[in-house]
Amino acid sequence: MAVKPFLGEVKASTPSWYKPNAKRDNQLPKGSLALYHVMGFRYFYILDECRDMCAFSDKGTAVFVAAALGVEMDMKT
């Protein structure tokens, strides 16, 4: 039997005024998110941490991680 100590915190984090609505809770939210800018790649800080963080794919694009995103950058465009 597994112990799940986080369940008490999850149940306590639901507001007392919240009442689930079956019709609304099963639908996707209206709206979308778009990403315009990412504060980038810290290659100059500690080189050992970032040594293998950038690579080139088979398509000729640069692939690296910035913040919590995987970025694929096309050098031609």
Image (tube, rainbow, N blue to C red):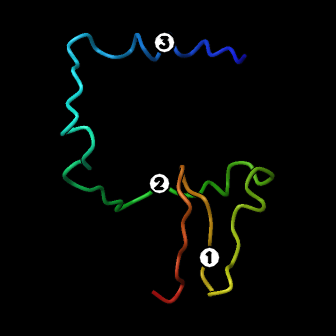
Amino acid type at image mark 2: Met
Q: Residue at x 53, y 75 (%)?
A: 73
Alpha carbons under labels 3 and 2: distance apart = 33 Å
Which quarter of the rendered picture does the C terminus lie within?
Answer: bottom left
Residue with the mark numbered 2? 39
Q: Residue at x 69, y 67 (%)?
A: 54
Instruction: Pick the residue in front: 30 or 66.
Output: 30
| Neighbours of disc 1 within 10 Å: few (<14), some (14-19), many (20+) | some
Image-based side of 25 in relation to 7, left or right: left
Which is nearer the N-term, disc 1 or disc 3? 3
Instruction: Pick the residue in front: 24 or 74.
Output: 24
Image-based side of 6 in relation to 25, left or right: right
Residue with the mark numbered 3? 9
The secondary element bearing badge 3 is classed as: helix
Residue with the mark numbered 1? 62
Q: Is residue 65 above or below residue 54?
A: above
Proximity of marks 3 and 2: CB atoms separated by less than 8 Å: no
Which is nearer the N-term, disc 2 or disc 1? 2
Q: Residue at x 23, y 48 (%)?
A: 29
Amino acid type at image mark 1: Ala
Amino acid type at image mark 3: Glu
Percent coordinates x, y for residue 75 in the rendering: 54, 84
Q: Quadrant of residue 66?
A: bottom right
Q: Residue at x 25, y 10 (%)?
A: 16
Nearer to us: label 2 or label 1:
1
